[in-house]
Amino acid sequence: MKKINIRAALGILLLVTFLSMPFIKPIQTYLAIPEHITVFNNDQETINLPEVKHATTAVAQSDRVIEAMDTSKFKTLDQGKSNIVYQVANIPVKKVNVDVLKDYKVIPGGQSVGVNLQTLGVLVVGHHLISTEEGEKSPGENADIQVGDIITKVNDKQIKNMEEITPLVNKAGESNKPLQFTIKRDEKTLEKELTPALDKDEDAYRIGLYIRDSAAGIGTMTFYDPKTKKYGALGHVISDMDTKKPIQINEGSIVKSSIKDIKKGNNGLPGEKQATFSADKEPLGTITKNTPFGVFGEINKKLQDSKWNKPMPIALSDQVELGKAQLLTVVEEEKVEAFDIEIVNSVVQKNPATKGMIIKVTDEELLEKTGGIVQGMSGSPIIQNGKLIGAVTHVFVNDPTSGYGVHIEWMLQESGIDIYDEQKQAS
């Protein structure tokens, strides 16, 4: 009986010890030591590690990638791979792998831009009934062409805009022959047969579909890379207002935009920037991608100057700190200004994800003018400690002072800029 009690007591003691280990400060410090760190090679960059009592740190004497400043702080010397080893009585107890990337800088944006998109094919945004001699009907709906489908071909003819469909419909209606529609539905390509119907009220042939071939709106420039001419803006995908699906683009452009008024946001009702721009203006650049991380392309005209119009280092997700930061945006005409915000939460992300940060507007001037984050502010670059860390993406509907941000690392990747490329080649 005594043996059983002793075993039970030992078991409980071991269990309590095991469960309490994470709360013991030296063990907490040890667990806080990362296994892997990625940094950029620039004068601003230092590697700060937790200090462990009775432990020392060491890097190889021949290492020209990093150098120890003291037992917990290191500076970068060159791009490459290295490691930092914690030792107790000259016995290695923990190794930290370090990747030092070549310094990469981009120019932060903040400018308001108009966005013009031409859809890939023609987008179906609704059905409508036609008054015929046989009653009301929608040939498009009867042919199982759905809202959100993209019409890419009619009778094997490539379709780029709505005007190209009308003569084909008239010809098929007059000859009483069906049209062969090629449509794209999500990732599938489907064939549908549709016979136009004669609208007795208008004496014209109709297909019973509402269609659209373009979209326009405003957003904010996030960054521009003067080396590659690539840019990123908006920080989120552009979706069709009727179908709520991402717009698949054939081509697009961005143009200068001027903010004329602000509709202030309130709880439950997001505000918006009210801007003017002309689709006929000479474009600033092209749009080649519309993704969950924003719109991307190349700039071929000079952007509006601002005091931040100089190359700035970028930060990875694990370098973002909670606390003070700034966003750059336009609230009047074309003037880019900096406003104070707070990083409330930031997720260290190893893979691309759109919601990497939660931010809160603290700037009294911006709160007075906009109520916080408003539509059209998406893409506004976020700056912290002299580095570009991300962009504003969405507002919280029930709290316009707060919203989400995306890490700049993923926007750069979507634009086609690979900040890791040279490091991969070197390794």
Image (cartoon, rainbow, N blue to C red):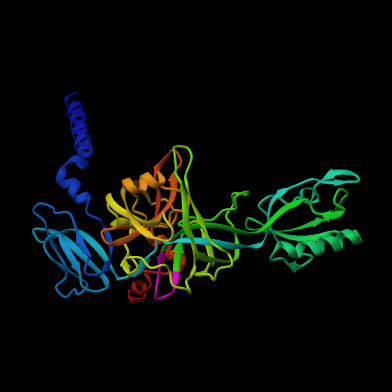
Residue 21 falls in image quadrant:
top left
Q: Is residue 143 above or below residue 224?
A: above
Q: Which residues are magenta?
A: 223-230
Q: Position of residue 248 (x, y in %)?
A: 60, 60
Q: Residue at coordinates 35% horizontally, 65% vertically from top-left?
A: 306
Q: Residue at coordinates 24% horizontally, 70% vertically from top-left?
A: 42
State whether residue 281 appears in this view: yes
Tell me if 123 is positioned left or right of 198 in this view: left
Q: Main secondary structure of the magenta part?
A: loop
The residue lying furthest to the top in this view is 1
Residue 338 falls in image quadrant:
bottom left
| Front residue (pair 125, 1) | 125
Q: Position of residue 337 (x, y in %)?
A: 35, 58
| Front residue (pair 211, 281) | 281
Q: Residue at coordinates 18% horizontally, 33% vertically from top-left?
A: 13
> Residue 228 lies in magenta, yes or no?
yes
| Front residue (pair 138, 200) | 200
Tell me if 266 is positioned left or right of 123 in this view: left
Q: Quadrant of the C terminus?
A: bottom left
Q: Residue at coordinates 16% horizontally, 70% vertically from top-left?
A: 60
Q: Position of residue 151 (x, y in %)?
A: 71, 59
Q: Position of residue 154 (x, y in %)?
A: 77, 63
> Residue 81 lies in magenta, yes or no?
no
Number of numbered labels in the structure image: 0
